[in-house]
Image: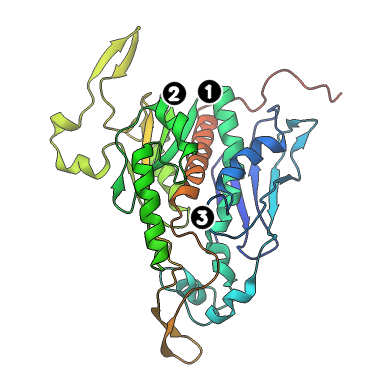
Amino acid sequence: MSNSMGLLFRITSFGESHGRCIGVVVDGCPAGLSLKAEDIQEELDRRRPAQSPLTTGRAEEDKVEILSGVFRGFTTGAPICMITWNRSADPSKYVAFRHRPRPGHADYPAHVKYAGFNDHRGGGRFSGRITAGYVMAGALAKKLLREQLGLEVLAYTVEIGGIRARELTVEEIRRNVEESPVRCPDLDASKRMEEEVKRAEAEGDSLGGLVECVALNPPIGLGEPVFDTLEGEISKALYSIPGVKAVEFGLGLEASRVRGSQNNDGYRLSGGRVVCETNRAGGILGGMSNGMPIICRAAFKPTPSIRKPQKTVDLSSMEEVTLEVGGLHDPCIVPRAVPVVEAMVAVVLVDQALRSALIPRVLGVRGDGW
């Protein structure tokens, strides 16, 4: 398995859905960053299950423990290990699926690739549960970006079940995203999305949707062409989130349907600075940030665990069978995916900022360890 990502700001994810814990090791965080558990917990709480009737009822507290890399309230430059314990795991609900792969899940390819040694309980290593570790690393990354570069990363739900939000201002996103059960700052669209999720759940089904992420005030030149482009690194990070099936930047697919005159962003001067008149490129040109807000979107498929009967094969008897998936599952993973998308974009931006020497390896004044 490949469980690490990043070059200078490197994260290693560990844990399984129904194992003892979920965690992450962050290597390469600069020394001297003020950090306490509350900084991480605030972000974890946004992702935590059972936070509304629209999310899974699995009652995990998701309380973070920082095991290393922080001393006297500051990062030391050593690897930072953070975990949260699985308190509400119930592997008994997955006994029936041991030899019956669930449609839409990674059960079957994982069973073949790892010769049946993979942890199948709740998807094991392939469960959305592992994103708790992503959010821990992202909380650290967001704090670094905010304090060192004045860069803010915001994500929100733009679409669920075909219901799309109108265009929104940054102020609306900041003000309304946490007021919505589906994390859509367009509160009118939010109500319609909420009803659509409830309707699908009542029918034993699920919905997917689209999360948009905006990184404000990025420096120019993040990204390492030609193979470690900014879009490529962000895309890789977003595709590591279970359920993501497509990623786009700026106009995205729409750029293939318009003319060059409609796609190009003209330049102008503003206060002595060169800026773009529009941002159809999503803040990235040639694999590098151009100083405009970085805009990307991640498309999430419907939650594959549904109550409707589905066809599968019993691998022990090699017979076709029908199964119904029980347990506790989100009818739509999009609302809880919002902080995960923020986290992974922030992790990439910190790694790229370190590679561009825009964030020092030691922050602030010298410590008093001696």
Label 2, label 1: how far apart the Cα atoms are: 8 Å
Q: Quadrant of residue 332?
A: bottom left
Q: Which of the 4 quarters of the picture holds residue 41?
A: top right
Identify the disc placed on residue 149: 1
Please tell me how crowded label 3 is: few (under 14), some (14-19), or many (20+) other residues with Cα within 10 Å. many
- The residue where tag 2 is placed is 217
Q: Residue at x 36, y 49 (%)?
A: 193
Q: Residue at x 38, y 38 (%)?
A: 187
- In this rendering, the label closer to the viewer, 2 or 3: 3
Is 82 on the left-hand or right-hand side of 4?
right
The percent position of residue 323, horizontal first and vertical second, equals 45, 80
Identified at 59% across, 30% down, the residue is 143
Give the residue type at disc 1. Leu
Q: Earlier in the sequence, mark 2 or mark 3?
A: 3
Residue to which mark 3 is pinned: 55
Amino acid type of disc 2? Asn
Quarter of the image where the C terminus is located: top right
**In the rendered image, the vertical position of residue 209 relative to residue 368, given as above or below:** below
Q: What percent of the width, then of the height, locates residue 236?
A: 43, 48
Residue 228 is at least partly visible in this image: no
Q: Give me the C-alpha separation between circle 3 and circle 1.
A: 34 Å
Pointer 2 with pointer 3, Cβ within 8 A: no
Q: CB of mark 2 within 8 Å of CB of mark 1?
A: yes
Going from N to C along the chain, the mark reached first, 2 or 1, is: 1
Mark 3 vs mark 1, foreground winner is: 3
Give the vertical position of 355 relative to 107 (above or below).
above
